[in-house]
Image (cartoon, grey):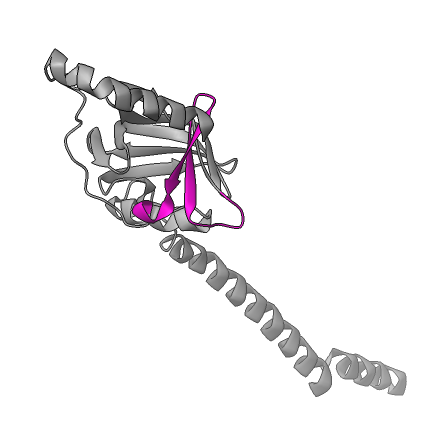
Amino acid sequence: HERSLNNQRTLSHNSQVSPSSLSSQQSMALYLFSLTLLFSLALLATPTLSLFEPDPDSDSISSTVYELLPKYGLPSGLLPDSVTNFTLSDDGRFVVYLSKPCTIEFDYLVYYEKTISGRIGYGSITELEGIQVKRFFLWFDVDEIKVDLPPNDSIYFKVGIINKKLDIDQFKTVHSCGDDGVSGSCGGSWMSFLQQIPEMMNEAEMLITE
């Protein structure tokens, strides 16, 4: 009978949980709960961060293309104020969309197609399509645009094998877009055309030597 009582006391003692053991279990449960809560909050925060990323379909993106050019060492006024959207890939390839084709009068009359594409790098735009310059009655495709590094007061338009040096200051301001100016580019009388021939020859010589 005494042995039976001792066994019961032993079982009763073993079945009791010490305060220190209970405290340890509570701490572990609280730690796991805290980790779960932090993980849940992190998941909830992820979509919120995406709200601050640029939306390619947003109208406000047209204002950022002019901020992008100076980051590549290029003047923001290379493009007219009529940009509606643009895309830029990791390899530097870009496409710029205008509301319509148009022209801007710099040292040369520059024609912008509705879609302009190329590859941008620091100090240069290569593989360019969609921009032309006019001299007298002829339009020339601009293949590349570049600046000296470190930058100075000049910018270069590459037309075929010719690099035409221009004053960079005229491209530092974003200009309004005019009519496309393509139709009637050969207008004027024959007499007026003949009078321009000497100047055209001088211009051709300048293009070749620069």
Taking the view exactly as shown, the residue that stands out farthest to the top is: 190
Residue 134 visible? The answer is yes
Q: Residue at x 45, y 50 (%)?
A: 71
Quick check: is 144 in the magenta stretch? no
Q: Is residue 61 above or below residue 120?
A: below
Q: Residue at x 13, y 12 (%)?
A: 190
- 31 and 196: which is toward the camera: 196
**Which quadrant of the rendered structure holds the N terminus?**
bottom right
- 85 and 112: which is toward the camera: 112
Q: Is residue 143 left or right of residue 33?
A: left
Q: Residue at x 51, y 38 (%)?
A: 90
> Where is residue 124 drawn, in percent x and y?
48, 38
What segment carries the magenta color?
A: 148-171
Q: Residue at x 38, y 36 (%)?
A: 87
**Which quadrant of the rendered structure holds the C terminus?**
top left
> Where is residue 171 drawn, in percent x and y?
32, 45
> Where is residue 135 drawn, in percent x and y?
28, 24
